[in-house]
Image (spheres, rainbow, N blue to C red):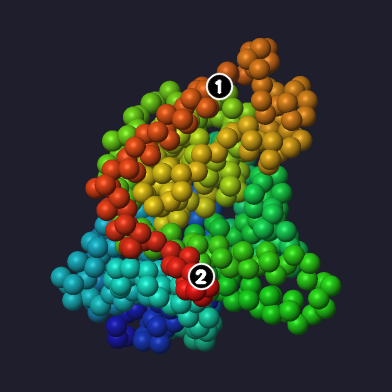
Amino acid sequence: MGQVQIVWFKRDLRLADHAPMTEAARRGPVLPLFVYEPELWSLPERSGRQDMFMRGALASLESDIVRRGGTLVLRVGEVVSILSDLRDRFGDIAIHAHEETGDLWTFQRDNTVRAWCKKNAVKFSEYRQFGIERGGDTTRNGWAKRWDQMMESAALPEPPAVDWIGADSDTLPPTQPDPSVTWLQCAGRRAAQDTLQSFLEDRGEFYQKDMSTPVAGEVGCSRISPHLVWGSMSMREMYQATVNRQADLRAGPAEERGFWLKSLNSFVGRLHWHCHFSQKLEDQPDLESRSMIPAYDALRERDAERLERYATGTTGFPFVDACMRYLAANGWINFRMRAMLVSFASYDLWLPWQDSGKVLARFFTDYDAGIHWPQVQMQSGVTGINTVRVYSPVKQGLDQDPTGDFTRRWVPELSHIPGKAVHDLTTVEAMAAGYPTPIVDHKAATAFAKDQIFSLRRDPALKVQAAAIMERHGSRKRQQRRRKSA
């Protein structure tokens, strides 16, 4: 039989544009393996909604493998133990997998797998999946150009022929209960393709504008993020489909372009943005628990009551509570509202970003550690290099929900408050409705928070640290623009 090629699927649940599968099929008989890791799913950032979506994507992959004449091997447990069992059974094995930028837990798990492979003389080949670079330059010089080169290179088709080999599978444990979620996106490759197509051809014309509001964003945003998290489509496939759509628009009548080109340019920018933030976690895996500038970790104190009211959408700030309740029920909310929710937790409530970040992570069906934790740090003002953005809950409500309909829908206690008045209640109105009065005074709380943040920013030693962070993690786009205009 020769050497058995194990393709270890992690967050890459597809057959097309899948370098590990392509290379494994070229080398010999292929055993496709997915390991359900209970310890991973017990992490505080994980939730039943993420588990349910993953299982849908996994079922899609399993169906595609069956279509090709194979069987996906499902195992439950610890990866090294499972690989050891397969080595005992098959003897000579090689392992193929995509690089993963995820939780610190997965980083440590992958290190353990590498150590086991080295000890047991098992070849472990890892392949890039995104524009994220491993073990390269410690700065961002040339990074964006290399990202473009990868995304523009040819996407891999499904391997034309695969010599499948099977093994016994385990029964997956029951899905984790998640009673708060009432709606979940469809998962799997076909759903991913349909979602992207509908965005590129129908829903996405006003993407630039729609991404700001939870009302229009529900339809006008791409909604491709959970498919990207679990790899039902590759980013390269998404990028090239978008570029092709842009080319078709440019070749067609100018009067039919509308706002499409601007919106799709913004979408391509978001794909860049995905890898830009994930690269930070790749380069510094402890960013899920430790501020880029560690001195900021001593600023905030834990407050269980405030965290609970934040998580349950009972802060007394109607638009904040509406967004949190919407997120809890749907597993998704648009980017600006995510930023507002982080800002509110970090500045109004003065909660440690690690605590509020875990609450949000559990609510996000599209939780991706590589984006989530660097973003939470940025929005919380602890990187030392980003603008401190403090969002006014009342202003955001007026701007993004001017009729008040969204807020009244998700905070039904206030359904009798007309129009935009729902965003700025009096104490009497709140008490009469049985709705909590504001948990803090926004102006006083945020003034205190900004004073604390800026006091640290003035520290000369921390300015030196911030300069080093900018060199390591900062975008080069602004510098490139300056050079072009010089």
Residue 198 in picture, x, y percent from top left: 71, 64
Inspect this view and state whether residue 452 appears. yes
Q: Are marks 1 and 2 in contact (CB under 8 Å)?
A: no
Q: State left or right for residue 281 relative to residue 184.
A: left
Q: Is residue 188 above or below residue 320?
A: below
- The numbered mark at residue 481 is 2
Which structural element holds mark 2? helix
Q: Is residue 335 above or below residue 180?
A: below
Q: How many marks?
A: 2
Disc 1: which residue: 438
Nearest to viewer (mark 1 / mark 2): 2
Nearest the viewer among 421 and 233 is: 421
**Residue type highlighted by circle 1:** Pro
**Residue type highlighted by circle 2:** Arg
Which residue lies at the image location 76% right of the left edge and 82% below the top edge?
251
Residue 217 in picture, x, y percent from top left: 67, 50
Which structural element holds mark 1? loop
